[in-house]
Image (cartoon, rainbow, N blue to C red):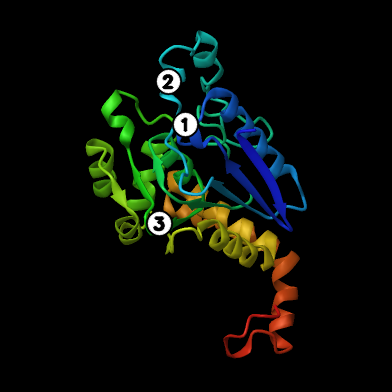
Amino acid sequence: MTIRVEQEGEVTVVTIDRPDARNAVNPPMADELFRAFVDFERDETAKVAVLTGVPGIFSAGFDLKWASGDLSETWYSEHDLDDSFDGKDDRPRKGPMGPTRLILSKPVIAAISGPAVAGGMELALWCDLRIMEQSAYMGVYCRRWGVPLIDGGTVRLPRIVGHGRAMDLILTGRKVEADECLTMGLANRVCADGTAREKAIELARELARFPQACMKADRLSAMRQWSLEPETAIAREWRSVATFRAEGIEGAGRFSSGKGRSGDFEEI
């Protein structure tokens, strides 16, 4: 089995398990990853997902040995996108690395140890948050082999780190260590080696404690605003008032009763 899915309470953990190939993803694995996250999206008991690899390896990207000889015209045609593509789960589309074209309603955290390069970096960029171990690294390593970023890398990287930094990484394909990733905002946390999975699950459980409709509404508004004029984006943000009616008024009542005072959020 090359893709493992485990439930840790309200957290779904998806693990890439192909260490002999540095967790390179071939088409059957991409299909497994895609199905795992479609299932996560549709599972009402699962609130947050963690995407990780076996210890010491996140993913070296798409399997270039497979690409050199086993990609058929069917593979190309099944990944084509038309004007109806919107990333939503009513008609989910698979990316070459699997879930990279899904716009989920729930957050995913990448737990990164070792390399997250080429398509593996694109998988990490697809996630909402990235926790990197001290010795982990990223890089557009596919630059050396004439393989473009076709799993959202050229879209998500500039939006995460800014255009100038993205051009540096995209054009040079250089190795980016964890501390530099943290400095530029590519990583959200850096942790000790061997602890990324644990730290990601811990963070996932924190997110799972929050009122979910509110968190998901804010997340989606932030994701959808990129193509909109500020006035339109603000108007659409107001739609989240429905979640205030559903969750916020009750939450305000909990605060008024004394919860959360002095920064104590253990019981919210």
Asked whether the beta carbons under mark 1 and mark 2 sit within 8 Å of each other, the answer is: yes
Name the residue that disc number 3 marks.
Answer: 187
How far apart marks 1 and 2 lie (CA) works out to 10 Å
Of the residues shown, which amino acid type is indicated by label 3?
A: Ala
Of the residues shown, which amino acid type is indicated by label 2?
A: Lys
Q: Nearer the viewer, mark 1 or mark 2?
A: 1
In x, y percent, where is residue 247? 73, 67
Name the residue that disc number 1 marks.
Answer: 21
Name the residue that disc number 2 marks.
Answer: 65
Looking at the picture, tell me which residue is in the foreground, 32 or 236.
32
Q: For the point 66% across and 33% down, which residue is it?
A: 35
Looking at the picture, tell me which residue is in the foreground, 256 or 122.
122
Q: For the point 50% across and 9% down, which residue is it?
A: 73
Please indicate, yes or no, whether residue 144 appears anywhere in the rendered image. Answer: yes
Q: Earlier in the sequence, mark 1 or mark 2?
A: 1
Badge 2: residue crowd in 10 Å (few <14, some 14–19, many ≥20): few
**Residue 62, numbered circle:** none
